Amino acid sequence: MSEGSTPPVTAEQLRAEIVRRYESLSKRLQQIGRYILDEPNDIALETLAVIASRCGVQPSAIVRFAKSFGFEGASQMQKLFRDGLLSNNAALGYSERVRQLDETTNATGADPADLLAEFVEGNALALQGLLQTVSGADMKAAVDAIAAADVVHVVGFRRSFPVASYLVYSLLQAGKRTVFVDGVGGLAMQQVGAMGPADLLIAVSYQPYSEETVGIVEAVSARGGKVLALSDSLVSPIAKPATCVLQVRESEVHKFRSLSASMCLAQALVINFAFEASRQAAPKAKRAKR
């Protein structure tokens, strides 16, 4: 798709096309594409000058980006996201509300209860935003992938470690054969080397992305293995090679990032799997009684 071609007619189509073409874009256009994927409300609501400033590019670069995807100009591209907001205004202005919270709060000399309130507000906004970044179709695809896998392997280092360990614990509790790729002894790559063709790797990583996790995802994908990624962008190093991606954007208050939305997503993912496993087991139990 290029200038003069038919542009996407929905925001979802544009996002899919950005992900598909991301690696072929110039570095500057990649900056714009990633911002569009991560901050769709800004694209809908802000002026071109504001968007350009936040992307770190000139306004002309955004116009060039829009034309490269077949639009006459940036305003036509922005209209797709405005239409999406009008049809689904849940968590309207989420990104801007988080930004304002970060700009207007000041922890210096604050009462401990005030600081707690700031983190509660930031996490509440992140949880609301989860409904924007993860669709019902995304959840179904992820649950189906877990249900279909012979064994689920889970990897997540550094800040992602609590989410990965929770997924392992919960999936085991739900009766799913699960392996924690913990990298003890520097053997993480060897651990995933034991994955079978019907297994699934769940990878969790956020910017700055763990080199170990990125390497494992690339190795598994190169072998044709299935990967479910939990990440903060659809074009992150672990999202691009993945079979399925769940995008989660955490709150950041006073430069401290949370994991509340990620833990909520992990919990919903496991419980949905448990429900699905129970539904599949019911007919088998009836046949066994006959």
Image (spheres, rainbow, N blue to C red):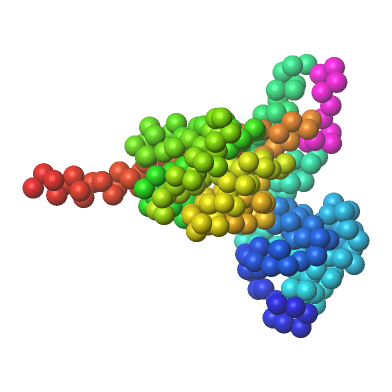
Give the residue displayed 51% in from the left and 37% down from the top.
181
Magenta stretch, main secondary structure class: loop
Locate residue 97, reporting x and y percent.
Answer: 75, 42
Q: Image quarter for residue 186?
A: top right
Magenta-colored span: 101-110
Is 78 in front, or is 18? 18
Give the residue displayed 34% in from the left and 37% down from the top.
175
Q: Quadrant of the N terminus?
A: bottom right
Residue 111 visible in the shown view: yes
Residue 102 belongs to magenta span: yes
Locate residue 241, reporting x and y percent.
Answer: 59, 57
Residue 40 visible in the shown view: no
Q: Residue furthest left?
A: 290
User: In the image, 35: left or right of 290?
Assistant: right
Locate residue 229, reporting x and y percent.
Answer: 56, 49
Is 40 in front, or is 178? 178
* Count of numbered badges drawn on the protein: 0
Q: Image quarter for residue 47?
A: bottom right
Against 148, is 22 above or below?
Answer: below
Give the residue displayed 44% in from the left and 44% down from the top.
194
Is 65 in front, or is 221? 221
Locate residue 221, reporting x and y percent.
Answer: 54, 55
Give the residue displayed 79% in from the left and 57% down from the top.
31
Q: Image quarter for residue 126?
A: top right
